[in-house]
Amino acid sequence: MRRFVLTGGHGVGKSSIILALEQAGEHVVFEAASSVRALARAHGIPFAEDRPTFESEALALHLQRERLVPPSTARVFLDRGALDHLAYSHVGRWPLHQDEIAACRASHYDAAFLVDAPPDGVPTLDRVEARFSQRLVAAIEEVYQAAAIPIIRVPYGRCHERARFILNTVNGGPLG
């Protein structure tokens, strides 16, 4: 099975691209952190990110979702990979245990598609979140490079153009 990650900063369109890939008939795995947030809200916890276990919970759900991809699947696109959780733990305030770090580093992907932000920045982010997102993208690039996973930049554009760029890239042969 070929495994491709969509990664990048906050609000750059990863989830929309994943939906477009799903609509095109691709097997996809949705981002785990938003599900952890939704479940916490359902249990009366409005800000799941305030808990020090947030990243561990998101990583556990992410790894579970990866394990549930049927082995017969030819390829899968993931909205963030396990290595993203490692980057979040470096940049944010969510420590991971050594076994969780090892699980992140043991993950293998054929390529990581780094989704570029709009040229003028993401309009929905305030300055603090925009700075965090910039640090996050640098950490993401670092962890994927350290794992020798090819990083392919997805230029800013309309959602369907970006999805087509990704599909053309994966259908075009060797990556990286």
Image (tube, rainbow, N blue to C red):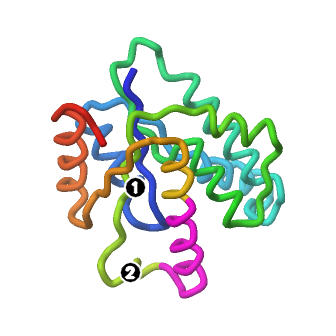
Q: Nearer the viewer, residue 71 or 172?
A: 172
The numbered dot on residue 74 is: none
- Label 2: element kind: loop
The percent coordinates of residue 29 (x first, y second) are 47, 36
The numbered dot on residue 121 is: 2
Q: Residue at x 39, y 20 (%)?
A: 1
Q: Residue at x 17, y 55 (%)?
A: 161
The numbered dot on residue 14 is: 1
Q: Amino acid at mark 1?
A: Lys
**Mark 2, residues whose alpha carbon is within 10 Å: few (<14), some, or many (≥20)?**
few
Q: Residue at x 82, y 52 (%)?
A: 53
Q: Is 34 displayed left or right of 52 in the figure?
A: left
- 97 up-or-down from 114: above or below: above
Look at the image and say whether residue 90 sits in the magenta stretch.
Answer: no
| Magenta span | 125-139
Q: Is 173 displayed left or right of 32 in the figure?
A: left
Q: Amino acid at mark 2?
A: Gly
